[in-house]
Image (cartoon, rainbow, N blue to C red):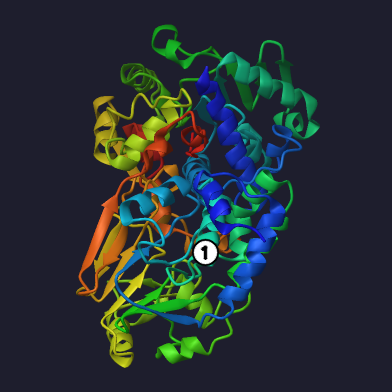
Amino acid sequence: MLDLDQILERLYHKQIIAEPVIAYLCSLAKELLIQESNVVRLSTPITVVGDIHGQFEDLLEIFRIGGPCPFTNYIFLGDYVDRGYYSVETITLLLCLKLRYPKRITLLRGNHESRGITQTYGFYSECLRKYGSANVWKQITDIFDFLTLAATIDDSIFCVHGGLSPSIQHINQIVVLDRFREFPHEGAMADLLWSDPDPSIQEFSLSPRGAGYSFGEVIVSKFLYENNMDHILRAHQLCSEGYQILFEKKLSTVWSAPNYCYRCANLASILQIDTDKSKFFNVFDAAPNQENPYVEPTAKATEYFL
Amino acid sequence: MEVLETDLDALKCRMSATKMGYIDDPYIQYFLPKRSIHKPPIINRGTYVRTWSIDHVLINFLNKIEGKKQIISLGAGTDTRAFRFLAKLPKESIKFIELDLYPNCVRKVQSIAKHEALHAKLGDYTLDATKGILLSDSLDILPFDIRRIPEAGLPDRADRSLPTIVLSECCLCYLEPNEANSICQWFQERFSCIGILVYEPIQGMDSFGKMMKSNLASRGIYLKTLESYNTIEDQETRFTDNGFQHTTALDFAALEREWIPEIEKQRIAKIEMLDELEEWYLLAKHYCLVFTTSQSLHEKLNL
């Protein structure tokens, strides 16, 4: 029997966990996550975290700013892997925290929690580099199929990675989806993980991303009304100030990867919601280690056109 | 010298974009064989827009004007444009002159010597790989430090009477502003029918720009003209001050939106899905294309 606290201790120090241990963690995670509904019900106080994308130092910064798990309740809105250089450490730490404190941390699935996307955007090659084979990538991407799709906070805030779907008017329709699979490019599941709000439209429109939809204020208002909710919280879109509030405060985007890809020089935030439902976007900058050239050659590896 | 390394970086980007199908380049394999390079989708897209837009301006120039035309490429490195154009356009009507530092010229001429697919395009030619020199009717490769142009002029092979475009694809930006401008002015004063086509970074003052300068500085690469020519407007004024009559300048976000045909946009969108459009717009806004012409070239192009 492995000691989760010992594994966590190693993970907090950014140590790579051995492949057999990852396999074991994944098998435990599968049993735990399979029991979660497609829409998890949560309560305040809670801290909401957006995209992390393998920026492990910034994940540690989030725990410093927001408070360590389990003393702070967390919901992560997905996109744990790809783009940054520490996707393995990031997803392993979060899965381990979920196993250790299942009621204190919720992990939603993002559009990067996908076999196809991770082969293009870095997680696959990182696993190859760190483990010499694709086994860990396979085990972890299998677990992605078990991550839940959405959550509600105090029955009044709807949380999802991307946004809304023309196929989903009511939250109960999400509950009955079969989520335990690689999600296809089209359909309700893809929409929930790929869609974006667009202040220039009213209803649904094809997304410039090539997956999901753009949706406007009318759609947001209808959804909130149908489901008796007052706010939508999502991530998925880079925000230079760390967050963005739209549609007369009916929808917010939380973005938690500062200086995204070590290039965008953006701020990041986490959203702290108290028991009185007050919302505070705690904005932060890149963790100091990100700028340290002796730790990892992140500056030198950042790509431009020369 | 780290500036030499920038050619290898650009080569790898073009290799990746070619392999994925953004760009059609049968010649690049001769410069970086046996390497499977896959750059991130955002870089492939940027490389495609860069290549497409420069090709677009140059092909328009070559097609619209009668008779022989000249393209002088500063810091050309392993660029395969000459071969791609000579394969499709009438050889007699084009003269490419590529200038670069000696080590880059040697490498390029060696590759050309080795591969028939390359030298077959040239017609009659002579080359000396140890000197990095290639001379032919349609393409010359000459080791030359372009900073010497204002004081020493160009090698004799350049013909000032021909309609000419000088191409700086991320080359002048590594020089001091006064060096870069002296070069531009030199061309403007001595060539009657001249244009300069520049691709380089802009917007160095915002947070993305500062991060770019800092990241590149850690590799020993300094964008020296970026401080002086920060915005599109600065670039326009720059060439007016250098004596050019007509200047078009736009950033790559605008260029992609306004110049690239819809059918092409759809084609490349299908190759790889971009996961983050905001990131692409942010990156694209920090690069520009500037095309400036003398009055006579402007008229010939019926702009």
Residue B63 drawn above or below residue B225: below
| Residue drawn at (61%, 37%) of the image | B12
> Which residue is under mark 1?
A100
Q: Position of residue B213 (x, y in %)?
A: 37, 31
Q: Position of residue B100 (x, y in %)?
A: 55, 20
Tell me: B145 left or right of B299: right
Q: How many marks?
A: 1
Q: Position of residue A269 (x, y in %)?
A: 31, 56
Residue A76 drawn above or below residue B140: below
Q: Secondary structure at mark 1?
A: helix
Quarter of the N terminus of chain A within the rendering: bottom right
Residue A184 drawn above or below residue A79: below
Residue B263 in view in this figure: no
Look at label 1 and name its amino acid: Arg
| Residue drawn at (56%, 81%) of the image | A35
| Residue drawn at (52%, 64%) of the image | A100
Mark 1, residues whose alpha carbon is within 10 Å: few (<14), some, or many (≥20)?
some
